Image (cartoon, helix red, strand yellow):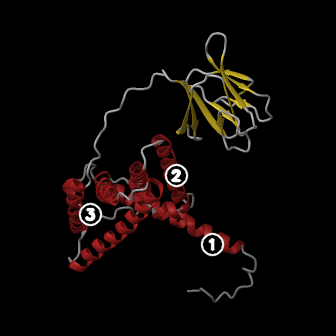
Amino acid sequence: MIWIERLSRHKEVLSRHSSLTDDLLIGRAYDNALVIDDPYIAPRHLRIFRDVEGSLMAEDMGTQNGMYDEAGVRHLALRLDGNTLVRIGQTWLRVREADFAVAAERRLRQERRAWPWFAPLLMCAPLLLVLLRWLENTGENNLSQYLDEIWLMTLSLGMWVGLWSLLSRLLSGAARAVWHTVIALLAVMAALLLDSFGQWVIFAFSSPLTAQYGFVCTWLLMAMTCLFHLYVIGAKHLRRKALIVFSLALILAAAQWLTKDPFKAENRLARSAYLETLFPPSWRVVAPKSEADFFADIRKMQARLDALRKEEAAEEEAEPGFEDRDPGIGAP
């Protein structure tokens, strides 16, 4: 007995057909042992038989579209070892004997429940948000501002989870809303901690680079979150999914960097104001600049500003019609 398997384009088994004889024909005609409804297959397209050595062979019956292996090479005859893939028309086939050795059974792992994670995260996420905002607040505390941020976070999470649950329902047949909520809550907490840690790094090390390029970490966190959502939907082709989402994240990060127009001198000067959150002086790792260094930086900044003013004045003088302008306009 032999088995003929029809495979999808992802090489997954769609159907299996058994045959008691090892000499049979495959095609679209109804007198074949295996009938395949593929318009690119001939009425009698393929013959499966044993050669003089007893090995299974596949032979093209002189068709127009031929027979191909997995590498895309056309063959008139091909030896089948149980793992050989054959394409005729747009259909993939694999032939195996009844005594073909299959892999050992996998250990069945019970699906983990998300509820033990759901309740603590549902409480910790808003508490963490309120705590971090309270630590960063240097003005008067107002309960309404914390409630507004919690409401905004809840609304954003609801839309995000709803989108992924709908996508999961369409692609895998199950919404898995609880797991998607757990992933979203973990991502929110990670984003809050990442933002606070980045602000501390900026303060502790006087690092403007962290302020300028910290958004890259945010995009990578977004890619990791999407990858976990995709894993919940389906664990297959995980490497391909990871490559796609991280590539998109880097492309979007590069696009965001370019929209800031980092090559303009005005934007380079604007980067000097990078410190948004103040911490206790004892939290600094790098000692602050001395008074002399501070005023030296001010003088350098003044020189750059003067150069920009001269460039703007030169551009205005070069504009057509500058000499015809009323000298009283803009005069002190």
Disc ID at residue 19: none
- List x then y, in percent, for residue 75: 73, 25
The answer to which of marks 1 and 2 sits earlier in the sequence is 2
Please tell me in which quadrant of the rendered image residue 164 appears: bottom left
Q: Which residue is mark 2?
A: 248
Q: Residues within 10 Å of mark 2 (few under 14, many from 20)?
A: some
Camera-side residue of 129 and 151? 151
Camera-side residue of 314 and 55? 55
Q: Which residue is mark 3?
A: 278
Please tell me in which quadrant of the rendered image residue 182 appears: bottom left
Dots 3, 2 in contact, CB < 8 A: no
Which amino acid type is shown beneath numbered disc 2? Leu
Q: Secondary structure at mark 1?
A: helix
Camera-side residue of 15 and 214? 15
- List x then y, in percent, for residue 195: 33, 58
Which amino acid type is shown beneath numbered disc 3? Leu
Camera-side residue of 138 and 282? 138
* Residue 283 seen in the current view: yes
Q: Identify whether 323 is placed above or below 235.
A: below
* Residue depicted at 38% across the width and 50% down the height: 232
Q: Nearer the viewer, mark 1 or mark 3?
A: 3
